[in-house]
Amino acid sequence: RVHGDQGTQERISFCLRVINEEDNEALVNAFVQQSKQSLQNFYKNLHAQQKAKALEAQKDGESSRTHKVQIDETIKFRQLKARGYLSQLDIEDEEFSDVKRATGKNKGEENSFEKRINRVVQLTGISDSIYAEAFVLVNQYDIILEFLVVNRTKETVQNLTIELQTVGDIKVCERPQSYTLGPGQSKQIKTSVKVSSTEMGSISGAITYDTSPSQDDRNCVCLNDIQINVLDYIYPSTECSEEEYLEMWSEYEWENKLIICSSKIFELNELIDTICKFMNMSCLTSKAIDSNSSFLSVNLYAKTVFGESALMNVSVYKQGSQITGDARVRSKTQGMAIALGNQFVSSMDTIK
């Protein structure tokens, strides 16, 4: 009696049928010999990956052990500082830096000027009376918004308030405060919102202000929407066995099927690596294929900061100078499947 899931039983039955066909020597030789060679290549690549990871972990351990601190270096205790001497912005910056050190994030990479510029969203036009832009920083379950507001009028604006509205599982944590800006004066305003799931979401709002105390109606400037990128909440992971992957694939009911068509990338392995980079996912299947092969199917996997799993199966084949195929995204929730699908489509547009 054969034990295991249905896929394992079908595979064993197929192998037995092929081996019993002694008359078809070409089929038996191809199935037995080439399968053996493929299995050897798989374990060879797996051993090389494990060895590379072990060397990398050893180097990281040595670099952490060689870090030295001078004996007379001052030890700072933030808890002993008087709150009166620290602004709220300083306190939040110190807390965020502690979180980055605890999670092992690269400080130099996060603070790079290029990455900061890429996260700046223009909220109003240059010709608007109030110019506003926001720097969006995602920190685990929080989104920190740093607004830069500039009064472009020749009058003093009073009771300037940024009112935010959210769509999705996003919640504004702080009440809006009022400010007064003189002509040409600018102000940096910092606020944060909470995120409770990895789904599509956006932040919209408006800036309201008064130009005179006797004015009955308030002036209003509408802000552009701030779209939340799902890739900020997922990270590649290899902590998933083939059995766990197949079990989750059968359990997750939400699927988003996408079309792949690329004429700029001519190698199957290169296309899979590009998709992994775009989607922030890791490949669980060995990409070692024969040079003459024109088909490749792999499983991609990622986890979210909320403990959810994202699955993707990519099947591509090469026809001349073009690679076509399809990708199937599966997740536990509909919003996550749609968000990953939208991200995949926008990413693939760059390599069509």
Image: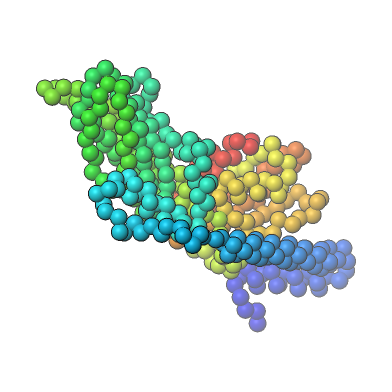
Residue 62, placed above or below residue 176: below
- Asked whether, in this view, residue 158 is left or right of residue 80, the answer is left
From the viewer's side, name the closer residue of 151 and 66.
66
The answer to which image quadrant residue 132 occupies is top left
Residue 302 at x, y percent in the picture: 53, 56
What residue do we see at 58% from left, 65% from top? 65
The answer to whether one can see residue 317 in this image is no
Q: Position of residue 267 (x, y in %)?
A: 73, 45
Please state if 350 lies on the left or on the right of 308 as rendered: right
Residue found farthest to the front: 72
Q: For residue 228, say whether it is visible.
A: yes
User: Is residue 197 left or right of 343 when viewed as pictured?
Assistant: left
Q: Residue furthest bottom?
A: 1
**In the image: residue 9, left or right of residue 319:** left
Which image quarter: residue 213? top left
Q: Nearer the viewer, residue 1 or 288?
A: 288
Question: Is residue 247 shown above or below 289?
Answer: below
Q: Residue at x 36, y 19 (%)?
A: 127
**Quadrant location of the N terminus in the rendered image:** bottom right
Label total for image? 0
Residue drawn at the location 76% of the way across and 65% of the way down: 44
